[in-house]
Amino acid sequence: SGFERISKVLKVKLDSSPSGVIINTEIAIKLVSRIDVMILELQKKIVDDIEYMTGLNVLGVNITVKSMVK
């Protein structure tokens, strides 16, 4: 939520370990010119939000873009 370039979140999977969590997600995005920049911004936002709201250590965020819509 709060990231207008995401059309839909298709799947989210959390892998937890004693040292933290790894977040794997699949998304559909709105067509953008620089997908790499958008994904980096999204990864940072997810890490910041999850660590702030839960206090969990986020070890990684893996994002798979499954589709693009206009």
Image (cartoon, rainbow, N blue to C red):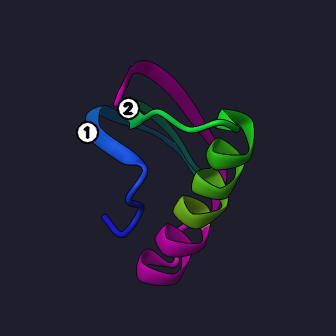
Q: Nearer the viewer, residue 15 or 67?
A: 67
- Could you tell whether 6 is left or right of 8 in the image? right
Q: Is residue 38 left or right of residue 4?
A: right
Instruction: Tell me what residue is drawn at x 38 percent, y 59 percent.
Output: 4
Crowdedness of circle 1 by 10 Å Cα count: few (<14), some, many (20+)?
A: some
Total label count?
Answer: 2
Q: Considering only order in the chain, which callout, 2 or 1, is on the residue closer to the N terminus?
A: 1
Mark 2 element type: strand
Mark 2: amino acid? Ile
The magenta segment: 48-70
Which part of the image, by quadrant, shows the N terminus?
Answer: bottom left
Residue bearing mark 2: 27
Choose top left, top right, bottom left or bottom right for residue 7. top left
Residue 15, horizontal then vertical, whole percent:
47, 36
- The image quadrant where one finds the C terminus is top left
Instruction: Give the residue number, with chain letter if any, for mark 1.
Output: 8
Q: Amino acid at mark 1?
A: Lys
Residue that protrudes farthest toward the bottom in the picture: 52
| Outermost residue, top side | 66
- Disc 1, disc 2: CB below 8 Å? yes
Is 18 included in the stretch rendered in magenta?
A: no
Q: Could you tell me which residue is drawn at 66 percent across and 57 percent down? A: 41
Front residue (pair 2, 52): 2
Q: Is any part of residue 60 visible from this angle? A: no
Give residue 47's quadrant in the image.
bottom right
Where does residue 56 sit, x and y in percent of width and height? 53, 68
Q: Is residue 45 above or below residue 68?
A: below
Q: Vertically, is 27 above or below 6?
A: above
**Distance in Å between CA atoms under marks 1 and 2:** 6 Å
Where residue 62 sits, quadrant-wise, is: top right
Q: Secondary structure at mark 1?
A: strand
